[in-house]
Image: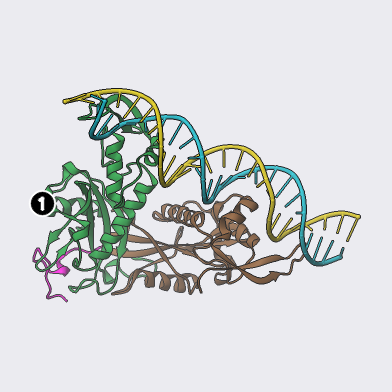
Chain colours: A green, B brown, C cyan, D yellow
Amino acid sequence: MATYRDSSDKLLTDYPRPSVAVDTAVLAVREGVLCVALVQNEKRRRLPGTFVHERETLADAVLRSLHDKAHIMGLRPRQLQVFDAPNRDTRGWVISVAHLVAAPQASISKAELTPMSEVRGLAFDHDLILELAVSTLRASYRASADPERLLGPEFTLLELLRLHSAIAGEPLGKDTFRRRVLGELVETDAYQPGLVGKPAKLFRHVEL
Amino acid sequence: MATYRDSSDKLLTDYPRPSVAVDTAVLAVREGVLCVALVQNEKRRRLPGTFVHERETLADAVLRSLHDKAHIMGLRPRQLQVFDAPNRDTRGWVISVAHLVAAPQASISKAELTPMSEVRGLAFDHDLILELAVSTLRASYRASADPERLLGPEFTLLELLRLHSAIAGEPLGKDTFRRRVLGELVETDAYQPGLVGKPAKLFRHVEL
DNA sequence: GCAATAGTGTCTGTAAGACAGTATGGT
DNA sequence: ACCATACTGTCTTACAGACACTATTGC
């Protein structure tokens, strides 16, 4: 590797290189509220992250950091954006690739989740990253029914509505919502036996 | 800097670090056709790019590489995504932050522009980057009138329509288009003297 | 019967898309 | 007068948002 040269005839290793980190906003809905998984540093709270290891994929680094620091497994990270302000990290030249992971309720333990309304003053530029992650998640749920597969495999429309309301941060009308998402879902023959009231039809996502 | 330690008590410099590059798809409309600015390597054509210099911002690296390799100046790069496949560059471990720059016709010389239809087989993963750049540009012009300020400061609706048609890669209906964008523009009192036919009103972008 | 939840009929407004018309300039 | 271009009236379709109504269950 070190013998190869680029077009301006410098060794790749001659270039100063930044430390490359991944930082991940793990978002989940708990009791109708949008929450984020935080970890505690020496002084301040921050998003879980790590430096990338040699020849490791960014997505793999995200999964490794979530496993090691937050005991979260089996999710699909989504790359957001590189944060590269030269002095964002006081320890040195560190650029961070921000990621978003949406977590179904089952995959995450309760204690680590902090409601969005209680989050302020995270370390580094993690407030910015979190803001971007939330608006990205909101936009993707405005665009389709359950892009992150937070529900499943079978669910009622009310469950889906509650998920959307939690993510949007405001209550949504049930009839409008119903007609908006019906086209993206497939009906099943099954019903959820209502604890009270008319039983609700169960739906699933398209394509198995 | 080297005296600071992270939470797992390793020096920042102890981590292996990737070379970090920026590669940029410079898109411009020339004679009604969407084009991209390419540079020639030893063997294959590629997007202009460079390695980031120490403590340099990614956007600054993009501007520097465009200035040095393609003599393009004064534009606003937009970050797309990190490409991090471990073997995307045969010279070593290189991750690339892909960027998009939309260039008004004046800012770029004719010779370097290649129509999109004639582009195939770029070096590295630059075909992928270019594909992402084009779909991103198309999406942003579907969403609003002239987000990249390719026209200006004054222009007719026909000029804007031709720009949109070139970016979309297909002709668009003029009456529908007119009503779609009118709300985002401000009328002026001026008219463009028609070479033939009724003179067209000149418009400008919102917010000065 | 009542309470509670599921689902529908229908009216509003808005916006896209298409067609054909009118308006205004140059020659 | 004629042509080419700029602009508008209007119809159709579709869909979001809201309200009220009907439907089906457990008790």
Q: Is residue B53 above or below residue D25?
A: below
What residue is rendered at 26% in x and 50% in y? Answer: A77
Q: Position of residue A160 (x, y in %)?
A: 29, 40
What residue is rendered at 31% in x and 63% in y? Answer: A82
Q: Position of residue B52 (x, y in %)?
A: 33, 70
Q: Is residue B76 above or below residue A37?
A: below
Q: Position of residue A206 (x, y in %)?
A: 35, 33
Question: For this rendering, which residue is in front, B161 or A92?
Answer: B161
Answer left or right for A169 relative to D4: left
Question: For this rendering, which residue is in front, B59 or B43?
Answer: B59
Magenta span contains residue B43: no
Please say whether residue B84 is visible from this viewpoint: no
Residues in magenta, as a range: B1-18
**The N terminus of chain A lies in quadrant:** bottom left
Q: Is residue C15 above or below residue A177?
A: below
Magenta span contains residue B4: yes
Q: Check disc 1 and give the amino acid type.
A: Ala
Magenta region, mostly helix, strand or loop?
loop
Please say whether residue B202 is visible from this viewpoint: yes
What residue is rendered at 17% in x and 64% in y? Answer: B15
Mark 1 surroundings: few (<14), some (14-19) or many (≥20) residues within 10 A: few
**Secondary-structure class at tag 1:** helix
Question: For this rendering, which residue is in front, B200 or A94?
Answer: B200
